[in-house]
Amino acid sequence: MMKYMYLALAILLEVTGSSFLQVSKGFSKPVPTIVMVLAYIACFFFLSQALKYIPLGIAYAIWAGLGIVLTAAVSVVIFKQTLDLPAVLGMLLIISGVIVINAFSKTAGH
């Protein structure tokens, strides 16, 4: 169970880092830039911990896929950006892929 907690923390920290990347305005604002750097460092630490238990391809697919979807959700809710129908459909396919990996793949290390 800890392997998925590590992966979840890595995902949340990656989303945090990406959000603060937006707020940093091209690294022109020091505090958001520092938060972004620290979030990414912590993100990769927790991803490395998850990789002790989850195969790289599986962990990265989940990390990247859910990171994309959650970052897009933050962009809509926090930054008031919009997503068109193809973007939403693509993200639904990403979520479907993560579900298929976790539910059916023997590689996922269940």
Image (spheres, rainbow, N blue to C red):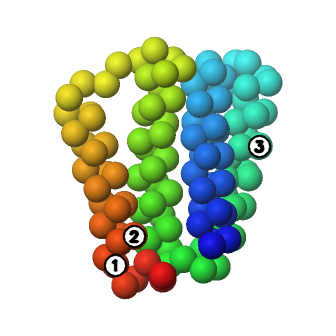
Task: Establish if 63 lies above or below 25.
Answer: below
- Which residue in the rendered view is the most extreme toward the top? 80
Dot 1 and dot 2 residues touching (CB under 8 Å): yes
Crowdedness near tag 2: few (<14), some (14–19) or many (≥20) residues, C-alpha within 10 Å: some
Q: Earlier in the sequence, mark 3 or mark 2?
A: 3
Q: Tell me, for residue 105, which label it has, or none.
A: 1
Q: Secondary structure at mark 3?
A: helix
- Quadrant hosting residue 106: bottom left
What residue would you read off at disc 3? 38
Q: Which mark is residue 102?
A: 2
In the rendered image, residue 70, in percent from the top left (x then y), is placed at 48, 40
Looking at the image, is 65 positioned above or below residue 1? Answer: above
Of residues 83 and 25, the one nearer the viewer is 83
Q: Which is nearer the N-term, disc 3 or disc 1? A: 3
What amino acid type should be assigned to the residue bearing mark 3?
Answer: Leu
Residue 14 in the figure: left or right of residue 57: right
Residue type, numbered disc 2: Asn
Query: In the image, what residue occupies the spot 71% across and 43% down?
Result: 39
Which amino acid type is marked by label 1? Ser
**The N terminus is located in which quarter?**
bottom right
- Does 19 sit above or below residue 90? above
Of the residues tagged 3 and 2, which is closer to the observer? 2
Residue 47 seen in the figure: no
- Which is more foreground, mark 3 or mark 1? 1
| In this picture, residue 79 sits left or right of residue 46 | left
State the CA–CA distance, disc 1 to disc 2: 6 Å
Whole-percent x and y of residue 58? 44, 71
